[in-house]
């Protein structure tokens, strides 16, 4: 059984830190006294997050980086270690979402989604995790999954398939990390969160069901700050699964398992 994670003097790495949940994770890290090492594919948004961290009294570094670039991530991991030592937290968070028919799949959407949402976290594991295990500093590697890691959504097969893969990645890592006490893994499964990734869902609901329904989508969403706070609490407690509002999908999950094992 791993002890609670001690963050004191540590650093938090966040991919996809330019917006939404990643930005909130960066701010939560600063609030909890950690240095931050931020990356995003969008340079201006990333610079804005670092400025917000600094305005909140935090400090750290930022690197414009595409998570599809394994070599860039490796250089980033080396530079982070040189600047701050081995990280206490790594959030493999960058992700994309695009709707489309599953019957007539858009192959370019599938390719991009798998490259960013699956190979992105794998590249992040590749760059950071081995070094973290070698350093043996108590740490947690947090992969941003989704409710879509656990249940499927129509016209979002590329996204849910990519997020299901994160469930398998986190579980496999948990098994392989079990023989050491320093580094653990978590799968963060947020429900709907009010970030720009919801823009497409909102536009679809607006055109199908009207303005009020589109507004209620945003209203029912958690804030990125709420998710970031839960993510830190779950990582500190070394939980494998960090979920919020899981009761909302519990019936679907139960049905799925029951079908599978023919209960
Ligand atoms: N918002 C939700 O409802 C929700 C729910 C569950 C899970 N998630 C997951 O949370 C994570 C963050 O999403 P968000 O809601 O904050 O969305 P967002 O669009 O606000 O932020 C995503 C960030 O990732 C960056 N990014 C995209 N492609 C990248 C790449 N190739 N390399 C590096 N950075 C890249 C974007 O520039 C952006 O800053 C994603 O993995 C998403 O799937 C979101």
Image (cartoon, rainbow, N blue to C red):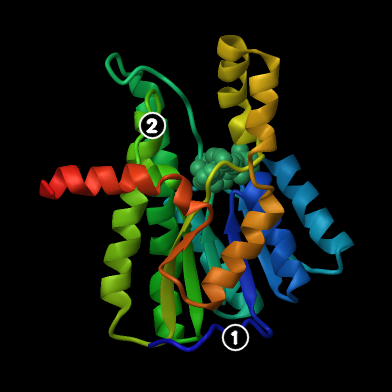
Residue 19, x across and y down, in percent:
68, 44
**Label placed on residue 153:** 2
219 relative to 231, above or below? above
**Left or right: 64 with respect to 3?**
right
Residue 38 visible, this orientation: no
**Left or right: 257 with respect to 21?**
left
Residue 263, x across and y down, in percent:
13, 49
Badge 2: residue crowd in 10 Å (few <14, some 14–19, many ≥20):
few
Residue 152, x across and y down, in percent:
34, 36
| Badge 2 element | loop
The residue under label 1 is 6
| Badge 1 element | loop
Residue 227, x across and y down, in percent:
62, 55
Q: Residue at x 61, y 43 (%)?
A: 193
**Left or right: 176 with respect to 87?**
left
Where, by quadrant of the figure, is residue 220 drawn?
top right
Where, by quadrant of the figure, is residue 9 drawn?
bottom right
90 relative to 136, above or below? above
Beta carbon at label 1 within 8 Å of ligand 1: no
Q: Residue at x 79, y 47 (%)?
A: 48
């Amino acid at each position: 059984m791993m002890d609670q994670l001690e963050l004191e003097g540590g650093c938090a790495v966040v991919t996809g830190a330019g917006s939404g949940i990643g930005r909130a994770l960066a701010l939560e890290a600063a609030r909890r006294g950690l240095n931050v090492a931020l990356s995003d594919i969008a340079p201006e948004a990333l610079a804005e997050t670092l400025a917000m961290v600094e305005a909140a009294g935090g400090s750290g570094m930022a690197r414009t980086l595409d998570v599809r670039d394994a070599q860039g991530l490796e250089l980033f991991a080396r530079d982070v270690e040189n600047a701050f030592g081995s990280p206490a937290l790594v959030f493999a968070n960058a992700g994309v979402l695009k709707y489309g028919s599953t019957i007539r799949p858009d192959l370019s959407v599938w390719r991009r989604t798998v490259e960013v949402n699956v190979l992105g976290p794998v590249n992040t594991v590749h760059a950071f995790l081995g070094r973290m295990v070698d350093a043996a500093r108590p740490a947690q590697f947090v992969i941003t999954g989704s409710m879509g890691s656990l249940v499927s959504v129509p016209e979002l097969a590329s996204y849910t398939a990519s997020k299901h893969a994160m469930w398998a990645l986190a579980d496999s890592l948990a098994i392989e990390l079990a023989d050491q006490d320093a580094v653990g893994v978590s799968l963060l499964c947020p429900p709907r969160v009010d970030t720009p990734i919801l823009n497409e869902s909102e536009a679809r609901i607006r055109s199908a069901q009207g303005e009020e329904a589109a507004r209620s989508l945003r209203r029912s969403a958690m804030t990125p700050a709420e998710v970031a706070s839960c993510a830190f609490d779950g990582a500190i407690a070394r939980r494998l699964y960090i979920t919020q509002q899981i009761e909302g999908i519990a019936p679907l999950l139960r049905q799925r398992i029951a079908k599978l094992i023919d209960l």
